[in-house]
Image (cartoon, grey):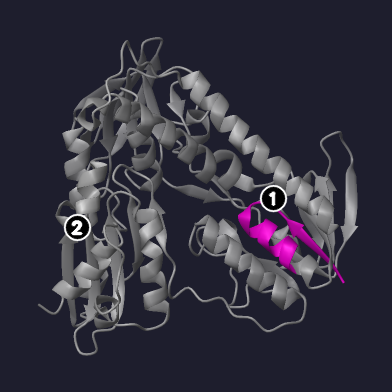
Amino acid sequence: MHIVVIGGGPGGNGAAVRARKLGADVTVIEDMEVGGTCLNRGCIPTKALLYSSAMYARAQDLNKYGIILEGTVRADLKAMMDRKDKIVGTSVKGIMASYKADGIKVIKGRGRLVSTATVEVSLPEGGAQAIEADKIIIATGSRPAEVPSFPFDGASILSSDDALRLTEIPSSMIIVGAGAIGCEFASIFRDLGTDITMVEMLPRPLATEDTDVSVLLTKEFKKKKMKILTSTGVTGVSTSPEGVTAALSDGSELKAEKMLVAVGRSLNSSEIGLEDIGVSTGKRGEITVDERMQTSVNGIYAIGDVAGKWLLAHTAYFEGLVAAENACGLETRMDYSCVPSAVFTTPEIGAVGIRDFQAEELEMNVVSSTYHYRTLGKAHTMGEIAGFFKIISEAETDRILGVHIAGAHASDLIHEAVIAIRKGLTSRDIAGTIHAHPTLSEGLMDTAINMHD
């Protein structure tokens, strides 16, 4: 059996490797670099910059740890970008090496479905190549969403991709959109000394997260002298050699050296031949799939961002596994009931399960418990006392429905909660489990204990 995977991001990579291990011949078609947005323009490069900027910010404060630096500490954005590029390049080479070792073929070019069994690849050197397939997995991902009235110019009005190519620290930046992407870039550039103003149309930043998370993040951002304008839109933008001027919906104006537009992602479902073979799409352009990740056309699967479920690299990876197993004749279903999310701001955010506003909207009978980082000895030793743990449980059964962590290492700590929810555990189960001391993870235990005090 020959399986063709269109797109070599986290989902496509997971699908390709799994299908190969199940005995299929696999060809991956990728028009840029393997690793997709996550590795090349998203998860990994932004986290590399976040660690660099956070270390620079910490260096300004080392005297609190008994460390005295003689002389000036300077942030070199070009060096940070070079480090980021080296990390990305090493990872890309690693994927290509694993493909070679596993016998997975890679064709560089843009894939388009011309039939239910044929993918035509437009090659970078010109011309095209037809690839026959028994099954096809579409993993074409997404790109930064553009606002038509102020499109990206790569110089003053930036996409997240453009921001990853800057080599000089902007003196000031307007960030349009206070979701995960906007908030992460706000953390990066504020730590480097940029004056940040965020503009968000919704009533709060990170509006998809628990309300308490938004409240804490707003508080911590304001401590860093970031401005956050909520329930506000950008009605127009003009540029000049001096920078950007943004007209706001309240009649005021903002001026800055750069503007980063982070209003979401557009799905890469156009011009890949879907309509020619009858693959159905939704209102946002998402390819509609069933729980087996199969599209409306038998034998054609779609995974990752282009399927429009959870636009997260780790979800795409698992969707890829599900698609590959079904393409190889197994019966596997995708389970979205317990998907963790992480936002790498300062402080970090880790979340899984139901949010407080969702419980309210669904009129669920729930109880919650909160425990603060400042009560943990480990947090004080680290100098990381901003944050909290929160558990939301079903009132009648005590079954854990949602966990939200805001604070240092939240993205790592959340996975105990993921397992707890997936296995149907109660807060008493967590409360009765011995956690090592002194650690941050014992904060989750203490939160569970508080539920019953």
Q: Residue at x 69, y 42 (%)?
A: 92
Give the number of marks.
Answer: 2
Residue 8 sits inside the magenta stretch: yes
The kind of residue tagged 1 is Glu
Q: Pointers 1 and 2 in contact (CB under 8 A)?
A: no
Label 2 sits on a secondary structure element that is helix
Instruction: Specify the label residue 348 is tagged with.
Output: none
Image: magenta residue range: 1-18
Q: Residue at x 41, y 9 (%)?
A: 241
Q: Which residue, given by chain and number where applicable, does mark 1 sit on? A: 271
Residue 158 sits inside the magenta stretch: no
Disc 1 versus disc 2: nearer the observer: 2
Is residue 281 or residue 31 the one in the foreground?
Answer: 31
Q: Earlier in the sequence, mark 1 or mark 2?
A: 2
Is residue 79 or residue 354 the one in the foreground?
Answer: 79
Disc 1: CA contacts within 10 A as few (<14), some (14-19) or many (>=20): few
The image quadrant of residue 261 is top left
The image quadrant of residue 220 is top left
User: In the rendering, at what x and y percent does residue 276 appear?
Assistant: 75, 61
The kind of residue tagged 2 is Asp
Label 1 sits on a secondary structure element that is loop
Q: Which residue, given by chain and number where applicable, does mark 2 sit on? A: 212
Relative vertical location of residue 242 with respect to residue 157 in this rendering, above or below = above
User: In the rendering, at what x and y percent does residue 360 appear?
Assistant: 20, 73
User: Is residue 274 among the parts visible in the rendering?
Assistant: yes
Q: Is residue 222 left or right of residue 200?
A: left
Q: Is residue 88 left or right of residue 72?
A: right
Is residue 76 or residue 146 the one in the foreground?
Answer: 76
User: In the rendering, at what x and y percent does residue 152 appear?
Assistant: 49, 30
Q: Residue at x 19, y 49 (%)?
A: 216
Relative vertical location of residue 198 with respect to residue 18 in this rendering, above or below = above
The image quadrant of residue 222 is top left
